[in-house]
Structure formats: C-alpha cells, structure tokens
Image (cartoon, grey):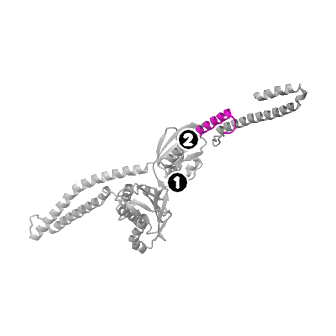
Amino acid sequence: MAGIFLLCWLINYALTRTEWVVITVVAILTLFYSTYNLYQYINRGKRELASFLLSIRYNDFSATYSTEVGGKADGELKRAYNSIIREFQKVKAEREEKDQFLQTLLEHIDLAVMAIDEHGQLKWYNSAAKNLLKKPYLRNLDGLSEVDETLFKTVQDLHNGERRLIRPVIDGRVTHISVSATEFKMREQQFKMLTLSDIQRELDQKEIESWQKLIRILTHEIMNSVTPIVSLTGVVQQILDDNRTNGNESLELPADEADDVKQSIHTIESRGKGLLKFVNTYRSLSKVPEPLLEKVDLRKLTERVLNLLRGDLESKNIAVELESNTDDLLENLDPNLIDQVLINLLKNAKEAVKDTESPRIQLLFQREFGRLCLYVKDNGPGMDPETLERVFIPFYTTKEQGSGIGLSLSRQIMRQHNGSIQVKSSPDQGTTFRLEF
C-alpha cells in the first residue's frame, strides 16, 4: 500500500519533468500492476473468508487452507482457519461417534422403540420393534392398525408419561405388551417416543413357577393322604382273603356282601394306585432337569426324531416336509430335552391331522434377527381363541387320552434354554408352533 502511494507521488513529480517521460511510463505501469495485485489479494481474502464461513454454514469441514501462499499475516490467518476447521472436525466426529453409539445401542436392545411426529409419521423404529410387530416396514401410525387394532388405539390415546398393559394379537399370537409414551420437542416439532416391551416371557416364567409350586404342594398333600389309604386297603383285602381261605365266619357277612366289600376295597386300592401314578407323572412338571448344553446341529437332531416317528407317521399317510432357509443350525442345547420337545410337537401335529384329507406336517428352520427358529406347522382344523389361550396350561388337553403336560413341559424346557415356544392358530387354518432358540 505504501509502495502505491510512493508511485503516485513519483508519477505526479515526473509529469512536471519532460525528461522523465520513460520513468513516468514505467511508474504508471507499475502502479497499474500493483493495484491489480492488491485487488486480487483483497478478493482472494474475501473468497477464502466466504469459503470458510460457507463450510461452517453447510457443516462441511473437508477444506484446508495452504499457509505457503501469501505473506506472514496471510499465513497466520490461514493457520487460524485450519485450526478452527480441525476443532469443528473433532466436534463433528465426536457427535457422529455418539450418534452411532446410540444408534447401535437402540438397535441391539430388546426393548422396542418408536418415534412418531405430530402428524403421525413414523420417523424411526429399531429392530426390536420390527421383530415384535412383525412389520419390517412402517411409514406412519395408521400402519399399526394392520398389526392390531387394540395396539393402534392404545398408541393413539397414550399421553406423555402414561403406561398401559395390553393383550394384542400379533401375527396370530396372543401376547402381553407394556406400552409407554414420552413426548418431547425438537426444533419446534413435537415428537412422541413409544416403548413397547413384550412381557410374555416374564408372565410365562411367573406362571410356570406358580404351577410348579402348586404341583409340589398338591403332590405332597395327595401322596401323604393316598399312600396310607392304598396301604390299608391292601391290608383289609388280605384279611378278607385270609378269612375266606380259613373258613373264618367271624365277620358274619353273607357271601355276596363279602364279595361286594372285597370288590369295593379292590376298587379303592385300584383308584388309589391310579392317583399315585397320576401324581408321579405330573411331578415331572416341577422337576425338569437342568439342561446339559452341548453344540448340536438342530437339523440332524430333528431328522433323528423324525426317524423315530417315521413308521407311525407313514402308517397314517402323513406327509412330512423338512426345509431350512439357513445353513447356520448349530446351537448350544441339551439334545435329550429338545428331543422331548420335538416329540411332543410332532405327536400333537399327528393327532391334529388325523381326520384331515391329505394330512401334512411341515418343519422349517430360519434365522430371525440373529436367532434360530424352528416352525412346526400342520394342516389340521386349528384351534379356537379359547383353546389357544389355554394350550400351555398344565393338565389342559383336548385329547381323550391326553395328559395335558406335553406343551407345559416343552415350554419349561425352552425357557431353560433361554428360548421360547409360541403358537399361532385359528379355526380351519391349521396350527403353527414356533421354537425360538
């Protein structure tokens, strides 16, 4: 800048001296060149400042400024730009890392989480919600009505801080869900965050524990009462037999009445033994052994069980199909206990299709959200809602010769493997059991 002022003075002085024409021309050219450089320098500084401010405006911190071009002051300014950009990059990276952490956390928790805006548009929901609702794609709140009407109305009516327990039917399965809502505001927009927790497992566990406790009490009381009755009836019957054999008429009973007494005592003894057998049979519900886990190929295990039942199934012309949508079929489990579960399910399926034209049982393996699932489906008459609700209750059975413990026992075994057993059925639509390992 000082050079320009000096040139201006020199030109003004030279114009008064005719002999300095050449010097005047050179000075004028130098002035124009210096002015042009000054203009370029100022514009470059403006462009760099504008670029720097725009990078902040659009959250783009990929640019860097070379400190090799320009003077000392220019270099210090660019170093300041670069320093500020590095700080913004650091803050952005930390924020993205935090967002990624929260995203990963929400994707891997078992709690279903959904975020809905004030217009009912679904902004985000995690894998647990997709798994619970059996809907991998949802755009808005109205889509929940396709899942279950009760769930849809509950979510609509739920206010900030409220929690409700509901029993929706999702994908043909009755379940228990705890729904809560939290409302918050972000960027002048209202949102509702919903959390849905499937408490069916917890309720199942409590129900199992209650039944086990009841069975233990009943077993103890019945055994204590029935054992002496059976023992005494045996003694009385022995006395009657001895009296008749020895011709002892001290009881003074006519022969026909003595026979009636003997028959009655025999009946009491027989029913007492039957009751003891009943109690011993159901004692297994309260004494399921702890699983001895080992790495097992579930397909091979299932094929082995099918081979055990193949003769019975073929004799009834029941077609059996075994398919798999995954090659990863290795699980840590107790093969003997899972054998029992599969035998129970296949026997139930066999019983269900006995009066069906073209009876068929289908078994399918597939991975769902990282968990191995086995579906056992029959084309029998299906179950009504009342039967469906009671199917896992101990001693409940719809079969004439059924014991009512097979499915209860199967549920306990699956719970011991940190898995679950679920059923989907409706009249005239067959029945599907789902084992989740």
Kind of residue indicated by mark 1: Lys
From the top left corner, tell me how far across and down residue 241 is, in percent: 14, 68
User: Which quadrant of the figure has residue 318?
Assistant: bottom left
Give the quadrant of residue 270. bottom left
Q: Is residue 111 above or below residue 160?
A: below
What's drawn in magenta, residue-wise?
68-89
Q: Nearer the viewer, residue 232 or 163?
A: 163
Quadrant assignment for the N terminus: top right
- As for residue 176 lying within the magenta part, the answer is no
Q: Which residue is mark 2?
A: 95
User: Which quadrant is home to the C terminus?
Assistant: bottom left
Relative height, residue 223 to residue 76 (above, below) = below
87 falls in the magenta region: yes
Q: Nearer the viewer, mark 2 or mark 1?
A: 2
Residue 134 has which mark?
A: 1
Q: Earlier in the sequence, mark 2 or mark 1?
A: 2
Residue drawn at x 49%, y 57% as measured from the top left: 368
Asked whether, in this view, residue 271 is left or right of residue 84, the answer is left
- Residue 309 at what x, y percent from top left? 39, 70
Give the number of callouts.
Answer: 2
- Depth order, front residue of 434/220: 434
The residue closer to the viewer here, 189 or 80, is 80
Q: Main secondary structure of the magenta part?
A: helix
In percent of width and height, residue 157 lies at 53, 41
- Left or right side of 269 for 391: right
* Position above or below: 50 against 260: above
